[in-house]
Amino acid sequence: MKLKNYLSIVSIAALLVACGQHLNVPTNVTMENRLPSIYPDYTEVTIPANICPMNFIVQEGETEAMARLTYPGGEFIYGEGQKILIDEEQWAEMLDSAKGKEIKVEVFAKINGKWRGYQPFNIYVAEDSIDEYISYRAIQPSYVAYERLSIVQRNITNFDARDIYNNMSVSTEDVGQCINCHSYKNFKTDNMLFHMRQGLGGTMIVTNGELRKVDLKTDETLSAGVYPAWHPTHNLIAFSTNKTGQSFHTKDLNKIEVQDTESDLILYDVDKNEVSIISELDDELEVFPTWSPDGKKLYFCSAHFEYENDSIEKSAEMIQRYKEVKYSLYSVDFNPDTKEFSNVQMVYDAASDSINQSVTLPRVSPDGRYLLFAQAEFGCFHVWHADADIYMMDLQTQEVQKLDAVNSPRSESYPTWSSNGRWIMVDSRRDDGNYTRPYIAYFDKQGKTHKAFLLPQQDPNFYTFYLRSFNRPEFMIEPVKVSPREFAAKAKEEAIPAKYAAQ
Amino acid sequence: MKKCLKHIYLIAFITVAYILLPVMNADYLYTIQDLNVFISGHTFMMETVQYEGGWFCWVARYLTQFFYYPWLGSTILILFWVAIYWVTIWMFDIKNKWSFLALVIPAILLYHLLDYGYWIYYAKLPALPFQPSFMVLTCLLFTWGVLYLTRSLKISWRLRGFIAVCLLGVIIYVSDFLWPSSPWHYNYSFRHSILTTLTDKNFKHELKMYRALDEFRFEDVLKEMPTDEDEAPTNLMVLYKNIALMHTGKMDKMFETNNCGIKPETNDSLNIRISQLGAPLVYYMFGHMNYSYRWAMENSVQYGLSFRNLKMMTRTAIFNKEFEVAAKYIAMLKTSPFHRKWAQEHEAWMMNSTNFFQSQECQTIAPLLNDEKNVLDGDNGLCEQFLLDYYSNLDRTNTPLLEDITMCMSLWAKNYYAFCIHFYDYVQSNPSRSIPKLYQEGAILLGRAEESPITLDGFRFDDIVADKFNGFVQEYNSLQYEGVDEQEIANRLKPLYGNTYWWYYYFYNDFNIY
C-alpha cells in the first residue's frame, strides 16, 4: 500500500474520531440550586475583550464534566474529563460577539454515573481591552534562598510565557544571584530595568533599547536601588535604598517579617549616570516611590521610627518593635526640568492613631485620579501579611475605600494599573495562603471595581502544580525586546559605577 | 572459555554493582530517591523540559523514583550500564579478551554514583543516578546509529566516527543556543566522597536514623545509635537519638547514651549543616512547624524540590491548619506511585480531624505544641543551637513532656542558670514525683556552683547519686593533684562515670555546632 493510501486512511480515521467527540449537553439532568464549584472561580466576573480563554476545572464529582458557553452568536460545548478547555479561535469569536455583553456558562458534572446541572453563571465581556503582556518575577515563596529565579513575560491574550531573564544563566553551583524588582517606563519596554543582587550584581537598565549594567551603590547612599519607578517623561528613575533584614515567626502563620532598618529615596539620572538623594531623614524609613502620570509628583511611603536603645543593634531593636513600624503615604512635588523636589505633603496618614495601619506599594492610575495601595496592620512587606488588603484613594476627594471586589481574607499586595486604567492587577495569596497569584479586576468608568479573576492558564490545574509565586506583576503593552541571552551576557560584565551628585 | 570472556566480565561487574548498590548502600539509594521528585502531569513536565537537557532530566527523575525500592532502581540502572557495555563492544568491535575495557564507562558511572557521600544533600543535579548514565547511553546510541547508517559509504570507519562525533557536537551546540539557561549545575568532577559512602559508619547511621525517625520508629532510631564507646556519633545522630528518647519517655537517659557529638569531616570543601541534612524533620519532631516548613522550603529552593521536602511541608501545613496548601502538596505526592499511599493517608487526616488526632503522628507531636507566645526570631542556620537556646529559655512548660525537655536541653547546653530555674519549677510543680537521676545529677553539680541561683537546702537527693558525685569529685581532684592531664582524666573516669552528666559537663568541650 502506498504512503498516500496510508495517509488517507489515517485522515479519515482522525476525522471520524473528531466527529465522535462532538459533545452534546446531557438531557437527563438533575438540577442543583446553586452555582457549580469551579477553579479558578470565574463566576460573574468581568473580563477584557482580548483575554485568553478562561479555562477552568469543575470541582464536582470526580470523572466527567461539561460546560455550555452561550454567546450572542451561538454556543459551544466543552469538556475533557473535569476540565473545560476552550478552543482559542472559538473563544476569540465569542469575545468579539459578546463585547459589552455576556457569555452564559452552564456547567454539568457526572456524579455516581448521573448528570447534575448547576445554576448558570455569566462571564461579562467588557468593551475595554487589556494590555497584551504582563511580566512577573517567578519565585518560590522562600525565605532567604533563591535559585531558579526568573522574570517572565506572559502574553495574556494567549498562553505564551517566556523568560525575560533567568538567574540560572549566570549562577554557578557556589555563587547564586537574586533578581529584584523590575520596572518599565510608561508600560513600554524600550526603557526598563531590573536589579540583581549577590553574584554578578548590578542594575540592568535598558534605555531606548540599549542595555547597560550599572552599580547604583555609592559611598553616600545606603544601598543600590531597590524599589524602582521610571519617570513617565524623563530618563529619570526614583529608587528606594534599603538596609533590609529578615526574621522568622515561631508560630505566626505570616511566618516571616521583612524589615528595613534604614531606607531612603534616591533619584538616578539615566543619561548622566548620576545618583542624588531625594530624602534621607534620620527617623524616617522612606520607601516605595511612584510617580504621578504627569511626572510632577512623587508619591512614597514613609514610617517614622526612632531607635531608642543604643546598646543593641538596630536590626535587633527593629525585631523587638516590629509592630510599631507603620508607613503613611506622602507626596513631594517635582520639577523634571530642574530635578528639584519641594513641598512634602502627607497624603494619607495611615499611621495616625485613628487609622493605625501601614500603607505600602502605592500606584497612581494613568488618569492621575486614583491611587491604589496595600494596607495592613504594620510593616512594609505585605505579601507576607495575611491581613493586607488593597485600598483605593480618590485623589480628588481624598476618600479612601477598601476594594472588597479584589480582596480576600489572605494577603493582597502589589497593586498595579493597566495602561488604559480600566484593569487592576494585584498579587493575592487567596488560593492557599502561601503562593501569590495574579488576580485581575475590571475598574469601570463609574469608578466601580468588579470581581477579580485569576489569570487564566492553558491547563486549569496549572496553579495547583506550580510552586512559584507571581511576584510584582506589571502590565506591559509590548514584549521585552532584549533577549535573555543578551541580558545574561551583559550580566557577566562589570557594572558601570554610578556617580554621586550632591544636591 | 575465551568466547565467554565478555559475559564473564559483565557478570562480574553486575555482581560487584549489586553488592555496592542495594546490598551495601540501600539507605543511600533510598535517600537519593527521597531527595528527588517526579510529579506526573503537564506543569512539572513543562517546567523540567523547558531547559537545556530537560528531557534527559525528566526521564532521569522518573527513573530515580524506583530507588524507593533500592534493588528495583539498581536493577534498572544496571540495565543501563549493561546496554552501555554492549553498545561499546559492538560500536568499537572490541575483541573478547579486551572486552573488559567496555566496562570502563559503567565503572566510572558506578563510581560517580557512589562518590557523592554527603553531597547528595547539596548537589544541584537532580536524578543523579540516572542523568549521567542516560546521557552517556544516548550519546553512544547516537554515534552507533550514525556509524550504522553510514556503513554503506565508502569512507573509513574513523572518518565515519569523526562525522558522528561532529554531529553530536553540533546538536549540543544547537541545544545550548536554543535553551539559554539550565536550572541545573552539571558537575561531573570527582568529589572524593566515595569513602564516605562506603566506609563512614556515621553517614550510614544518619541515613538509617532519619528514615526510622521519619516513620516514627523510635526504637529503631535508638538501635541504630552506636553503643561502642570509641565510636563518636555526629551531632545529628545525637539529635536523632535524643528525639527518639524524648518520644519514648526516656529523655533523662540522654547522657547515658553517648551525647558527645562531633561534626562530620569530609575530604573536600563541603561545609555540612544540619539545616540541609535533617533540620525540617528535627524541627517537626520538636513541634516547630514554621521552622520545619521554612527549612523544607529553603532546601527545596536551593537544592531542588524533593519528595522529602514536599512531605515535610505537607505535614507542617496540616498541623498549622493550612489545609489548602497541604492539599496542593498532597495533589503532587498523589501522582507518585511510591508516595501515593502516604499522601492519601494524610489527605484523609485533613478530611477527618478525628483520624488525625488519633494518629501516632499527632499524638506524638501535639504534646510539644506549647502555648508560648509567638516570637520573631531566627536560627542563623544553626538548628541545634536554636533548639538548645529556645528550650533552655522557655518560660511556659504546659505539659510534663515540655518540663522534661526544658530540663534536658538546658543540661545539654550546659546552661546551668536555666536548668536551676527549671529544676526549681519542676520540683515545685511535682512535689510527689521522684526526681529522675539525671536531674539530681544536674542539681547536685550545679547547686554547688558558685554562681548558682539554687540552694540545695530542702531538696533531698538519693544517697546513691550524692555518694557517686562525691566519689567523682574525689577521684577527679586526686587525678588532678597527680598532674594527670584532662584528656587522660576523662579516659580514666569514663568507665565509672561516663554515663553521668558530670562526665559530660567536665569533659565534653568540643561542642561544634554546625
Image (tube, coloured by chain):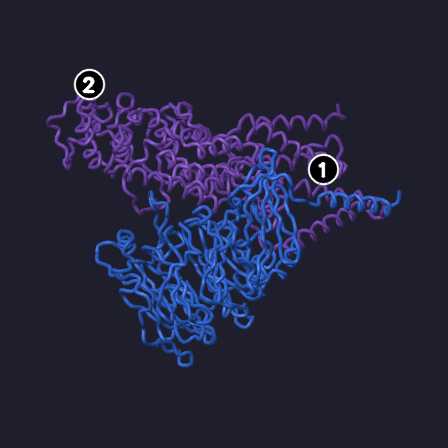
The residue closer to the viewer here, A56 or B248, is A56
Tell me the tag on residue A134. none
Q: Amino acid at mark 1?
A: Thr
Residues at marks 2 and 1, CA–CA distance in whole angstroms: 73 Å
Residue at 53% x, 47% y is A39
Q: Position of residue B271 (x, y in %)?
A: 43, 43
Which residue is more in the foreground, B62 or A100? A100
Q: In this image, B401 relative to A431: left or right? A: left
Q: Colour of chain B?
A: purple
Residue under label 1: B88
Q: Spot the residue most to the left.
A: B457
Chain under label 1? B
Q: Are marks 2 and 1 on the same chain?
A: yes
Q: Among all residues in the image, which is located at the extreme right?
A: A1
Q: Look at the numbered discs 2 and 1 and tell me whether their residues touch, using CB distance below 8 Å.
A: no
Q: Is residue A212 visible?
A: no
User: How far from the left and from the top, in percent, is residue B391?
Assistant: 28, 37
Q: Amino acid at mark 2?
A: Ile
Give the blue chain's letter: A
Which residue is tagged 2?
B464
Q: Residue at x 75, y 49 (%)?
A: B162
Of the residues under marks 2 and 1, which one precedes in the sequence? 1
Give the structural element (helix, strand or loop) at label 1: helix
- Splitting the image into 4 quarters, where does residue A94 fall? bottom right
